Image (cartoon, grey):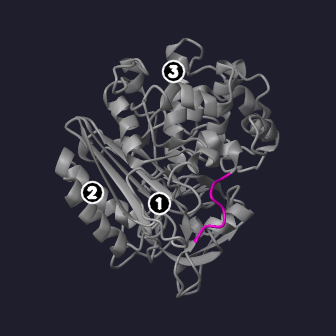
Amino acid sequence: MTADLTRRLTELIEEHEVPGAQVAVLAGGEIAEAAAGVLNTATGVAVTTDSVFQIGSVTKTWTATLVMQLVADGLIELDAPVRRYLPEFRLGDAAATAAITVRQLLDHTSGIEGDLFLDTGRGSDAVARLVAALGEAGQVHRPGELFSYCNSGYVVLGRLLEVLRGKPFDEVLRERLIGPLGLRQAAVDADEAILFRAAVGHLPGAPGQAMRPAPVWALAASNAPAGARLSMSAGDLVRYAGMHLAGGVAPDGTRVLPESVARAMTRPQVALPDIGYGSHWGLGWQLFDPAGSGLFGHDGSTIGQNAYLRIAPGGVAVALLTNGGNTSALCRDLLGELLFEHAGIRLPEPARPPVRAEPVDAAWVSGVYRSAMAEHVVEVDSDGRAWLRTKPLTELAALVTPPARVELVRLRSDLLITAAPARGRHAVYALLGGKGNGNGEGGGSGARFLHASRAMPRQE
């Protein structure tokens, strides 16, 4: 199996212009691993199965697992206000500060402005200092109102762990997950990652030029609980997934979570807009569930690196780690094949623009929508064509999402989709709220949110 897996991975990274990748498959109690390409195009060092890649926001499931250990130990209640355990927790909105619960942080329904990547240094107080800075954070929506992906909320969860366990987040991660799981290719920061063959992210070059290694290796340490720094091999990532498949039991028999708590993490908590991001969110996990399969997992993105983890009931897990290029297309092709082969799960076809799209309702879609990272302007020209102009608002945003103007077409009454793909996928944007005619159409005040995993409020 390994030889075939290596051959297929090699073919697909060339097809999708991915510099390097790892894949690991857990099936039938056995793990197969493969690697292909290079860790860094500037050095040409080959990817091996013991190399480490950043797993990005897949880290959030690790943070959620650690929080659920607190639940199992009787140290917190999911529906208790966060301030019961973190009295220093403050947001710009006093009512939201008092109301937000631990559950709402786990399932991304807190409404906290989500992408506050403040660099508070590399010390053991980095997470605490970012949480202290949230006193200026805005509120995107009322707590519990809807799903809006929130990195900041997971930083708060990381601080909750630090306070209740009495140790910095990285130490809690090592002692309560990395150690008990027996993981050998895992690093919590750059100082540890350099001891391994570590991948470097790659960003698109100028038109007509090749990808270039990213000028920054990782996000700020303050965002570690949300996915800033944790790195590992694909093999170790599926070993972690295997613990969840086994109802919270590590390979050596160590119980990491009670079975009832592990299962609770995959129960739907909130439905998602139909943007290709999954159907629901659980307590940390993305729930994909095509055709009722029970498929769950998480994706992760850092600066030029992308990670994908899919877990299927019945003992199958697949992890794909990459360092640039058309990674969404690679994921769709490779993970689609592996999940069908080993779990009988056929992934749904990704959304594509209709051959003949209906006109866009200008009154419903036009407007300025803003997140902490970027301003998005949707406008409809005199020919009836819709356009999305994106303006990054931070240096980090400019690094990963440069200014762009792309055409949008109507996918559904409440959905827009990019006319051309980028990095292997057509992005889908949902229009939520506002005064329409009941089916997502305009005719009133226009949409309240433009939603692309983050709910971006309309500004004007």
Callout 3, which amino acid? Gln
Location of mark 1 (residue): 414
Give the camera-side residue of 33 and 86. 33
Q: Which secondary structure, mark 3?
A: helix
> Residue 250, located in which quarter of the rendered image?
top left
Instruction: State the residue at coordinates (43%, 48%).
Output: 233
CA gap, disc 1 and disc 3: 39 Å
Give the camera-side residue of 39 and 156. 39
Would you call the spot at circle 3 few (<14 residues within 10 Å), some (14-19), or many (20 or more)? many
Asked if 435 appears above or below 460 in the picture, the reply is: above
Residue 202 percent location from the top left of the image: 54, 68
Q: Earlier in the sequence, mark 1 or mark 3?
A: 3
Would you call the spot at circle 1 few (<14 residues within 10 Å), some (14-19), or many (20 or more)? many
Callout 2, which amino acid? Gly
Location of mark 3 (residue): 69
Asked if 360 appears above or below 7 in the picture, the reply is: below
Location of mark 2 (residue): 336
Q: Are marks 3 and 2 in contact (CB under 8 Å)?
A: no
Asked if 8 appears above or below 453 in the picture, the reply is: below
Q: Nearer the viewer, mark 2 or mark 1?
A: 2
Q: Are marks 2 and 1 in contact (CB under 8 Å)?
A: no
Q: Earlier in the sequence, mark 2 or mark 1?
A: 2
Most extreme residue toward the top is 74
Instruction: Specify the label residue 436 is tagged with.
Output: none
Magenta-drawn segment: 213-219
CA gap, disc 2 and disc 1: 28 Å
Q: Earlier in the sequence, mark 3 or mark 2?
A: 3
Residue 60 percent location from the top left of the image: 53, 40
> Residue 281, located in which quarter of the rendered image?
top left
Image position of 265 (left or right of 7): right
Callout 1, which amino acid? Asp
Image position of 424 (left or right of 441): left
